Amino acid sequence: QMQLVESGGGVVQPGRSLRLSCAASGFTFRSHAMQWVRQAPGKGLEWVALISYDGSIKYYADSVKGRFTISRDSSKNTVYLEMNSLRAEDTAVYYCARGPPLGAVDYWGQGTLVTVSS
Amino acid sequence: SYVLTQPPSVSVAPGKTARITCGGNNIGSKSVHWYQHKSGQAPVLVIYYDGDRPSGIPERLSGSKSGNTATLTISRVEAGDEADYYCQVWDTSSDPYTVFGGGTQLTVL
């Protein structure tokens, strides 16, 4: 069955960096665009970034543009989120998700918690 | 940036009908997707492209749009429907980005 398993979350100090990974299985990874969506404590869902099926197109939310980078490695069926210059407001559960530009997210991972705190 | 407005909460008795609205400027020209999110679990897509249901989603859940409002309707509400529900659209006025509504907490009385 389809699985998206996030890893790499944890506690990090403001201004530092962290890389999240999402291992995909159960579907043809190289055929699908992938996304990251986050949810801060007590808040709603917030889209973070999208990468096209082949990695050639990337879109970012204004709140992370210039600080976060999404990438993928189809040889490892993995999508990444490199997060730099982290801020307290980046504290959230980060979900890996499958879905195309302009379309719906049809599958989500269980999420990984990132806490930015000194 | 584009804004989607949802009521923070909706309460309904079991067996009744719940309607969760999602308002946005010119939403009629955009495709609306809906998600169910239960605490501690991954979100689940329940309606896509305004009114289509993924396999496995019961027919009790339906989506519609009228004017500047999209609506998720849950008929014959069950205790298991209690969750947060989010609407989502894509905006292409500049680089494409997607927006979620603030979410509606559905409480089954």
Image: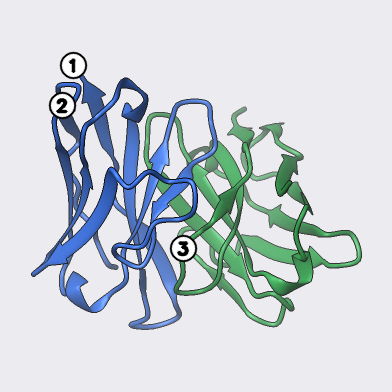
Answer few, some or many: residues within 10 Å of disc 2's Cα (few below 14, many 20 plus, some between 14 and 19): some
Quadrant of the drawing holding the C terminus of chain B: top left
Residue at x-position 16% and y-position 32%: B10
Q: Which chain is home to disc 1?
A: B
Q: Position of residue B48 (x, y in %)?
A: 39, 61
The circle on residue B11 is: 2
Give the residue number, with chain letter if any, for mark 1. Answer: B109
Task: Tell which residue pokes out farthest to the left in this image.
Answer: B67
- Residues under labels 2 and 3: Cα distance? 26 Å
Does residue B82 appear to the left or right of A34 in the view shown? Answer: left
Q: Which chain is home to disc 2?
A: B
The circle on residue A59 is: none
Give the residue number, with chain letter if any, for mark 3. Answer: A104
- Residues under labels 2 and 1: Cα distance? 7 Å
**Which of these two is toward me, B58 or B11?**
B58
Q: Position of residue B96 (x, y in %)?
A: 44, 77
- Residues under labels 1 and 3: Cα distance? 30 Å
Q: Which chain is home to disc 3?
A: A
* Amino acid marked by disc 1: Leu
**Which of these two is toward me, B66 or A74?**
B66
Tell which chain the image draws in blue: B
Does residue B51 appear to the left or right of B18 in the view shown? Answer: right
Does residue B11 appear to the left or right of A71 in the view shown? Answer: left
Q: Do the CB atoms of the residues marked 1 and 3 lie less than 8 Å apart?
A: no
Tell which chain the image draws in green: A
